Structures are given as structure tokens and as C-alpha cells.
Image (cartoon, helix red, strand yellow):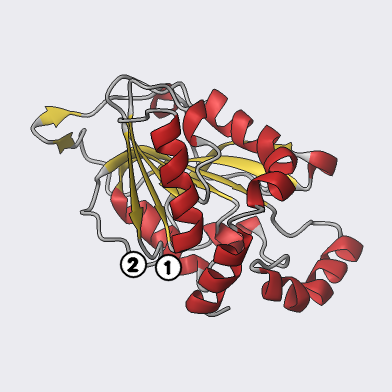
Amino acid sequence: MDLHKIERVYTSYAGVYDKIFGKVFHEGRESAIRNLNVQPSERILEVGVGTGLALPMYPRHCRIVGIDFSEGMLDVAKKRAIEHQMDHVTLHRMDAGAMEFEDNSFDTVVAAYVVTAVPDHRKLVNEMIRVCRPGGRIIMLNHFSNGNKVIAAVEKVISPLTKHLGWRTDLALHTVLEGTNLHVTRKQNVNPLRFWALVECVNRKHESGRPRLNGTTVFSPSSDNRTAGHASEEALA
């Protein structure tokens, strides 16, 4: 998938996205944000913020930065932010595979329906790991290839067709996590027919002490205190 082609596709969706996909994907977004247990002054990055449907769901005591490569989608998100008077939200047009943020800039990174909609999922995941602090959380809400061989075969066949619509269907979760230091702490199926998965990971990159952002020690979310060993086969199923 070509980045600029994807941008054109999603910009063409901008005016109708909320009506077509809003209700379908609402449960997943709500589940992702409801379980975040957002702390005061927590810095959250939403990758692929789209039309900003999830923005009103976040508490106002945190700082939200949203990025998207589609100018059309971002325009809708900006209007939503103004309409809801969300002065804790900042929006930028940016390539998720080459973010302009410094290392360890965020406590939590959320990517809803994004991993299978970018040209290179490895660049995206590596960038999310880079900008997320050690011990921080990376949340992925996405459809991943089903472990069922029959369904997986169908997904592989239709993936070339869905790429023209802006996403792929043949990407497995273990492929996304392979070679990374992300450790799955929670995985649940959401949305209609449970074809989408909400995956919460802890970023275990070079974790030697708590990092400091802007001169202050960043918060320690409840997920940091969990025992988070390597993702089990069951978690990745």
C-alpha cells in the first residue's frame, strides 16, 4: 500500500466515515479508553486519530496528541475538538511511520484500526515503541488474521481487494509483535462478531529506572505493576 494512495482513500472517506464506521467501531474505541485508567497529566498519543471520534471519550485531566496523515480526516477532527472545547487536545498531520516526536515523549500510545492500514506495520510499531517511554503502554485495536486456517485462507485471498479500500486483512498479531519488546498484558475480542482485538502491551525497552519528562517523574500506571512476562501462545491466539 502506498502512503499517498492511502491518504487519498481516507480523505475521500472523511465526510461519511462517522456515519458508516462510527457505530460499528464504537464499542472497540470505548473499551480501549474505558480501561486506560488515565492519570492526571498523563501524555497520550493517538496514532491515526481520524475524524477524532474517540477524543470526547478521554478524561480532560490528561494531554492528548493526535496524528493522522489524511488532511480530510484531520479537518473533521479539528472541528470536533473545537465543538467540544477540548483545549487538552493537540492535532498534527504526520506520517505514523516517521513521527516527529522525541524519544519517550508519551506515557501511552493508542492505535485504533491503524496497524493494518499503513504501508509498513514494522515502521509504525517501531515508532510507537520509540516515542513511548519505557514501561509505558501501547494499545492496539485492530483486526488481526484469524488462527482458523479456513478463515485465514479467506482473509489472505481478499486482502489484495481490501487494500484498495485502505486496509489489509492478512496480518497476524504474532507477526506484528515479532522481534519487539512489547509484552501483552491483556487481549480481548471486541466489536460485531468479535473479529477485532483490543491488545494492551507494556513497552519493555531498556527499562532501567523511571524516565523523567519535562523535569518531573512520569506517572506509573496500574499496568506497570502487573507481572508482564513474554506473551503466551494463548494471548496471541
In the image, residue 13 sits, relative to residue 49, either above or below, namely below
Q: Quadrant of the N terminus?
A: bottom right
Tag 2: amino acid: Ala
In the image, residue 231 sits, relative to residue 212, either above or below, namely below
Q: Provide residue 145's location: percent of width, then percent of height.
A: 74, 60
Q: Earlier in the sequence, mark 2 or mark 1?
A: 2
Q: Is residue 147 visible?
A: yes
Q: Provide residue 181's location: percent of width, then percent of height.
A: 42, 52
Furthest-right residue in view? 150
What residue would you read off at disc 1? 123
Does dot 2 land on a helix, a strand or a loop? loop
Front position in the image: 74 or 46: 74
Q: Residue at x 75, y 42 (%)?
A: 24
What residue would you read off at disc 2? 98
Tag 1: amino acid: Lys
Q: Provide residue 156's location: percent of width, then percent of height.
A: 79, 73
Front position in the image: 170 or 202: 170
21 left or right of 101 in image = right
Q: Is residue 48 visible?
A: no
Q: Residue at x 73, y 49 (%)?
A: 20
Labelled pair 2, 1 in contact (Cβ < 8 Å): yes
Q: Provide residue 72's location: percent of width, then percent of height.
A: 49, 60
Q: Give the CA separation, mark 2 to mark 1.
A: 7 Å
Q: Residue at x 65, y 66 (%)?
A: 167
In the image, residue 75 sits, relative to residue 154, either above or below, namely above
Does dot 1 land on a helix, a strand or a loop? helix
